[in-house]
Amino acid sequence: MAIRRKIPAKRKSKNRAKGTLVTKSVSVDSAVYTDMILNKVVPAITQKFPTAALKKGVKVQQDNASPHKAVTTEFLQSQGVNGIAMVNQPPNSPDYNVLDLGFFNSIQSLQHQKSNINIDELISAVETSFYELPVETLSKTFITLQKVMELSMEVHGSNNYKLPHLQKDSTIKNFSTFRVDCSSVIFDSALNQLNSLS
């Protein structure tokens, strides 16, 4: 969902006449973000999610950027939106966001293979790359996310860890059902650390 607007060009160029509608990006403040969530994201979720999943509840993860703080679960409920919860990712923790962890980079690498000379072509290239990206790529990223969580538990919540190469292609047969088994030693150590804080 690109956030953009069309405005008439103020000057002519070799590519267009003055007054031709050109696409411009929009700065995202809390009003723009709130409008996008209410009028684009929520309708897309309710239209595309299976009804059973909606009844269980859907969580939308957002980062802690200032404009995002305006949209909370309570705000959505006040607007008549039920079954959708807004969840903030931990601050300064892009490793816990599957999009930042690998999905955006995968789309970007496909997008860079396409030539674009203006914003409209760039948006089209990103959208096309999104649909071209194999579902296995996202599944692999979720597997990496599971390993990141385990490693973070091992170092008691720090991000001071080195992610090993998981050799997913050669060791995993079904990416959509695979899950990382957390070591019981790591789990117990993390639990003991948490209990010592209270």
Image (cartoon, grey):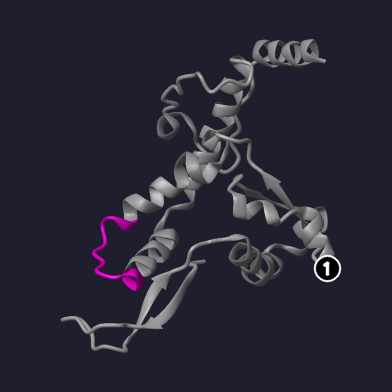
Q: Nearer the viewer, residue 140 or 64?
A: 64
Q: Is residue 11 left or right of residue 92?
A: left
List x then y, in percent, for residue 135.
49, 52
> Vertically, is 92 above or below 66?
above
Residue drawn at x 59%, y 22% as measured from the top left: 152
Residue 59 visible (yes or no): yes
Secondary structure character of the magenta stretch overall: loop
Residue highlighted by disc 1: 80
Q: Is residue 175 above or below residue 129?
A: above
Q: Amino acid at mark 1?
A: Gly
Q: Secondary structure at mark 1?
A: loop
* Quarter of the C terminus within the rendering: top right
Q: Which residues are magenta?
A: 111-121
For residue 33, what is the image quadrant? bottom right
In this view, the residue in front, 67 or 166, is 67
Q: Could you say which is closer to the camera, residue 198 or residue 54? A: 198
Q: Position of residue 94 (x, y in %)?
A: 52, 37
How many numbered badges does the structure rendering display?
1
Q: Where residue 87 sits in the image (x, y, percent)?
A: 70, 46
Residue at image coords 50%, 19%:
160
Would you say 93 lies left or right of 70 here? left
Q: Is residue 175 visible?
A: no
Image point (78%, 54%), residue name: 73
Q: Residues within 10 Å of mark 1 (few under 14, many from 20)?
A: few
Queried whether the magenta region covers residue 177, the answer comes back as no
The answer to whether 187 appears left or right of 2 in the picture is right
Q: Position of residue 124 (x, y in %)?
A: 37, 69
Q: Quadrant of residue 16?
A: bottom left
**Residue visible at 59% across and 46% down?**
63
Q: Is residue 122 left or right of residue 115?
A: right
